[in-house]
Image (cartoon, rainbow, N blue to C red):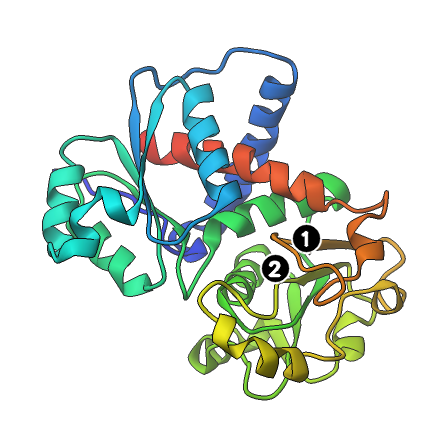
Amino acid sequence: MKTVRHFLRLTDLSTAELKNLIHRAIELKELQRNGREHAFFPGATMAMIFEKASTRTRVSFEAGMAQLGGHALFLSPNDTQLGRGEPIEDTARVISRMVDIVMIRTSGHDRIETFAQHSQVPVINALSDESHPCQLLADMMTWYEHRGDMAGKTAAWIGDGNNMCHSFVRAAGLLGFHLNIACPEGYEPNAELLKAYAHCTTLTRSPTEAARNAHLLATDVWASMGQEAESNARMAAFSGFQLNSDLLSMANSEAIYLHCLPAHRGEEISAELMDSPISVIWDEAENRLHAQKALIEFLLNQ
């Protein structure tokens, strides 16, 4: 029985595979823009298991499967036994006998790991509390599209040391750029992860220091879904960690900035930057579609 490839963290890809995926995503984007047929997987079916809601994730995966000639099934917590006591192992065994690939968006990364261990088909992490690798595919694609190879460059993460930050850390290791992380005390990324990637990361409390001469600035909301009760405390802790024109002025003159969306204008990012004509955030959002299509193609062809 052949080994099934999953995509649960960015490091499930080698550096060469990640670079190839970025290039392939750009090719697929061109095919889509030029109206060229690329239904490479007629009849293929993806199960999309959503334990956390999302606009961009659902649209990008569902549209992507349709464009590849397949079909996507949307499964909310009300549509599966996962929320009603069936062991994840059993759900994985059943669903993976009926579909060709599975996408899961959930809070607990351990749930995705367990599902993948018992799945006969590839499993994609569409977001967990520990990692958001699909977003990083789109982010790195966007950076490459606009500024070329990332090796030897510097990126700055401004804000919470969350799942997005974890994925940026892994991207730095794979693609050879340095990541400056600016976050308030108590909101650092996983300590063991930072230790493992100490050669390509720097932790600071100063957004200005992190942004200085950086080629890329990135941020995320201060309170993610499920953290609403912490909103007031987080607003106070992250005061001064806004991505704005003052911070951008500290970066490299060719710097771009990213936000995975949804954004809270006036909090983690200024409205001015969100609506600026130089923003590539909307390219970044669109690139979820193309990067995930490249990922689906890669996994189904293994």
Under mark 1, the amino acid is Met
Binning the other alpha carbons within 10 Å of mark 1 as few (below 14), some (14 to 19) or many (20 upward) gives some
Q: Is residue 139 above or below residue 194?
A: above
Q: Is residue 130 above or below residue 204?
A: above
Asked if the residue at tag 1 contacts the one at tag 2, i.e. Cβ–Cβ closer than 8 Å, the answer is: yes
Q: How far apart are the two marked residues, 2 and 1, measured between alpha carbons?
A: 7 Å
Nearer to the camera, 83 or 40? 83
Q: Residue at x 35, y 56 (%)?
A: 106
Q: Residue at x 52, y 78 (%)?
A: 230
Under mark 2, the amino acid is Gly
Asked if residue 255 can be seen in this view, the reply is no
Q: Is residue 110 left or right of residue 134?
A: left
| Marked residue nearer the N-terminal end (2 or 1) | 1
Q: Residue at x 16, y 48 (%)?
A: 81
Q: Is residue 283 left or right of residue 292?
A: right
Q: Which residue is mark 2?
A: 176
Spot the residue most to the bottom: 185
Q: Is residue 97 above or below residue 217?
A: above
Looking at the rendered structure, the secondary structure element under dot 1 is loop
Q: How many marks?
A: 2
- Find residue 53 and report its horizontal and vertical position in percent: 42, 50
Asked if residue 197 can be seen in this view, the reply is yes
Binning the other alpha carbons within 10 Å of mark 2 as few (below 14), some (14 to 19) or many (20 upward) gives some
- Find residue 19 and report its horizontal and vertical position in percent: 55, 43
Residue 129: image tag: none
Q: Which residue is mark 1?
A: 150
- Residue 271 appears in which quarter of the rendering? bottom right
Looking at the rendered structure, the secondary structure element under dot 2 is loop
